[in-house]
Image (cartoon, rainbow, N blue to C red):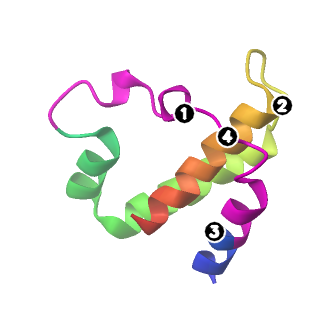
């Protein structure tokens, strides 16, 4: 069921929220040989990272457009990145 939710979300919002990956996944997460999300998978396992990404997506959708300095589009794009990471 989570894959269906991810698919629907990504397809609904991909045309509305197109941002460069660097705004969503900035270089400070990729400043070493392995990307942070991959290190999390190695350290915690896929199930823990799945839960983390789902929680992160919920957080971004919950606060969408309400945090100073983040537009609704930026929060939606971050949620989309988290949900897409589940499928990687």
* Distance from Cα at disc 1 to Cα at disc 2: 15 Å
Query: Circle 4 sits in a helix, a strand or a loop, which is it?
Result: loop
Between 65 and 19, the one lying in front of the other is 19
Residue 34 inside the magenta-drawn segment:
no
How far apart are labels 1 and 3 at the CA level?
A: 17 Å
Name which quarter of the figure residue 8 lies in: bottom right
Query: Quadrant of the rendered structure where residue 87 is?
Result: bottom left
Q: Earlier in the sequence, mark 1 or mark 4?
A: 4
Q: What residue is pinned by disc 4? A: 18
Residue underneath mark 3: 6
Q: Please give the count of numbered marks on the rendered protein.
A: 4
Question: Which numbered mark, 3 or 4, is in the foreground of this view?
Answer: 4
Residue appearing at x 39%, y 64% in the figure: 88
Q: CA distance from mark 2 to mark 3?
A: 20 Å
Element under disc 3: helix
Q: Contact (CB < 8 A) between labels 4 and 2?
A: no
> Circle 1: is it few (<14), some (14-19), or many (20+) Cα within 10 Å?
some
**Relative image position of residue 84 (x, y in whole percent):** 52, 59
Residue pictured at 63% horizontal, 68% vertical: 6
Q: Residue furthest right?
A: 66
Label 1 vs 2, first from the N-terminus = 1
Instruction: Judge whether 64 appears above or below 67 on screen.
Output: below
Q: Nearer the viewer, mark 4 or mark 2?
A: 4
Q: Which residue is mark 1?
A: 24
Sequence-first disc among 1 and 3: 3
Whole-angstrom CA distance, mark 1 to mark 4, is 10 Å
- The stretch in magenta equals 8-33
Q: Of the residues under marks 4 and 2, which one precedes in the sequence?
A: 4
Dot 3, how many residues are within 10 Å of its Cα: few (below 14), some (14-19), or many (20+)? many
Alpha carbon distance from label 3 to label 4: 16 Å
Mark 1 or 4: the one toward you: 4
Location of mark 2 (residue)? 65
């Amino acid at each position: 069921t989570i894959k269906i939710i991810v698919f629907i979300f990504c397809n609904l919002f991909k045309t509305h929220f197109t941002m460069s990956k660097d705004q969503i996944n900035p270089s400070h997460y990729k400043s070493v040989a392995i990307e942070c999300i991959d290190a999390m998978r190695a350290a915690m396992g896929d199930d823990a990272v799945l839960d983390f990404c789902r929680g992160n997506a919920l957080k971004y959708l919950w606060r969408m457009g309400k945090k100073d300095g983040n537009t609704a589009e930026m929060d939606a794009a971050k949620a989309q990145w988290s949900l897409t990471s589940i499928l990687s």
